[in-house]
């Protein structure tokens, strides 16, 4: 859907009983499409936050399952479900509409399949309040399908590295930054992901992007799992939620385990094949940055070559992810 069409998107929402009049500090946006069986874990992790001055907009991308009913079970007046009448087909539609509806001075994204640890908002809001950063992001645990977790990326200089991609579930940003950068672009207009394209544009515009030195989210990526939509997988979210609730030292224990992971992104284990491949990709990434190209596009071209053809093609990455996740093929309107 083009930007002109996005301006005409309408939505339906469940009325929020006795909604608070005072604007919250943070608007949390969960974008979702037909995975009602995992929504309770994402929403539960927002409710578990030690920082409580927030509103939550669960933004459905034309959901046709029972997502509305699942959200309605949470009687907290800070929570609303908003469903786009016309499906956009990627994160850009729900996220852009969520920002338009946001009342908070800060905006936080949370993917429907990810889980925040309880101090995520506390640490990110404190970082924004005490600095002039436009956007901050935390370290993230990446949950592998085999049950192990690893730290996805490290930022030793406490800033954004264009060669790395902080998951958007880790972001909290000032609402006015969205006005400066513009809305997220739909999948058919980008070579990577709508969220990655947006943060890269923010960086190119000179936005101040800061890293918070704390691991506060668990990413259960649909990118690395097959048929998560068609099989309605939810076992990993349920197990991680159980572990985190039962073990107060879960984060510390997983940080120690992540140190010895055999596929660490921080390359603490110097397997020669992993190291050489990483060095090669890093060199290509630096060359791309020097040429004004998003290095994530180089990574996506390398990762999904048969879907790109000889030359890069907009929308190819999301089209491949549709196939992997068990979603019906995307057809351009």
Image (cartoon, rainbow, N blue to C red):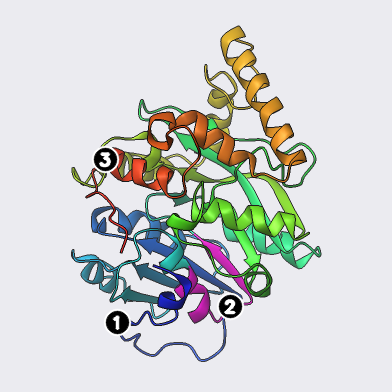
| Alpha-carbon span between mark 2 and mark 3 | 33 Å
Q: Which residue is mark 2?
A: 104
Q: Label 1 vs label 3: CA separation?
A: 30 Å
Q: Which residue is mark 1?
A: 12
Q: Residues within 10 Å of mark 1 (few under 14, many from 20)?
A: few
Q: Secondary structure at mark 3?
A: helix
Give the left or right position of residue 6, taking residue 208 as reference. Answer: left
Sooner in the amino-acid sequence: mark 2 or mark 3: 2
**Residue 32 placement, left or right of 100:** left
The reply to whether the C-beta atoms of the residues labelled 1 and 3 are less than 8 Å apart is no
Mark 1 or 3: in front is 1
Circle nearer the N terminus (2, 1): 1
Kindly state the secondary structure of the residue where label 1 is placed: strand
Label 3, residues with CA under 10 Å away: few <14, some 14-19, many ≥20: few
Marks 2,3: beta carbons within 8 A: no
Seen in the picture, residue 55 relative to 281 is either above or below; the reply is below
Q: Quadrant of the N terminus?
A: bottom left
Quarter the C terminus occupies: bottom left
Mark 2 or 1: the one toward you:
1
Residue 39, picture quadrant:
bottom left
Residue 153: image quadrant is top right
Q: Is residue 275 above or below residue 171?
A: above
Residue 210: horizontal and vertical position, in percent? 74, 52
Q: Residue at x 42, y 75 (%)?
A: 6
**x then y, percent, for residue 189:** 49, 57
Q: Which residue is mark 3?
A: 235
Which residues fall within the magenta stretch?
A: 96-109
Q: Are marks 2 and 1 in contact (CB under 8 Å)?
A: no
- Position above or below: 291 against 69: above
Q: Residue at 44% x, 30% y: name it.
A: 305
């Amino acid at each position: 859907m083009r930007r002109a069409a996005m301006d005409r998107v309408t939505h339906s929402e469940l009325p929020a009983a006795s909604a608070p009049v005072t604007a919250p500090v943070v608007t949390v946006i969960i974008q979702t499409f037909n995975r009602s069986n995992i929504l309770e874990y994402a929403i539960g992790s927002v409710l578990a936050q030690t920082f409580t001055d927030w509103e939550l907009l669960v933004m459905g991308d034309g959901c046709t399952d029972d997502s509305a009913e699942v959200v309605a079970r949470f009687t907290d007046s800070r929570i609303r479900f908003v469903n786009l009448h016309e499906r956009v087909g990627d994160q850009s539609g729900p996220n852009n509409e969520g920002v338009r509806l946001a009342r908070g001075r800060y905006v936080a994204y949370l993917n429907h399949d990810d889980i925040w640890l309880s101090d995520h908002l506390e640490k990110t809001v404190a970082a924004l309040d005490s600095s002039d950063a436009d956007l901050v992001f935390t370290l993230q645990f990446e949950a592998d399908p085999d049950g192990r977790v690893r730290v996805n990326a490290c930022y030793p200089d406490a800033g954004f590295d264009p060669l790395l991609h902080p998951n958007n579930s880790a972001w909290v940003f000032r609402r006015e930054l969205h006005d400066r950068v513009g809305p997220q672009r739909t999948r058919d207009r980008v070579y990577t992901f709508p969220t990655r394209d947006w943060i890269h544009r923010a960086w190119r515009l000179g936005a101040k992007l800061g890293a918070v030195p704390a691991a506060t989210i668990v990413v259960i990526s649909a990118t690395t799992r097959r048929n998560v939509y068609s099989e309605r997988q939810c076992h990993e979210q349920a197990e991680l939620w159980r572990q985190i609730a039962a073990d107060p030292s879960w984060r510390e224990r997983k940080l120690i385990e992540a140190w010895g992971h055999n596929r660490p992104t921080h390359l603490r284990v110097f397997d020669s094949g992993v190291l050489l491949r990483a060095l090669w990709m890093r060199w290509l990434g630096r060359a791309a940055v020097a040429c004004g190209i998003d290095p994530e596009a180089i990574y996506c071209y390398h990762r999904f070559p048969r879907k790109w053809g000889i030359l890069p093609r907009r929308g190819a990455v999301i089209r491949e992810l549709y196939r992997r996740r068990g979603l019906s093929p995307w057809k351009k309107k």
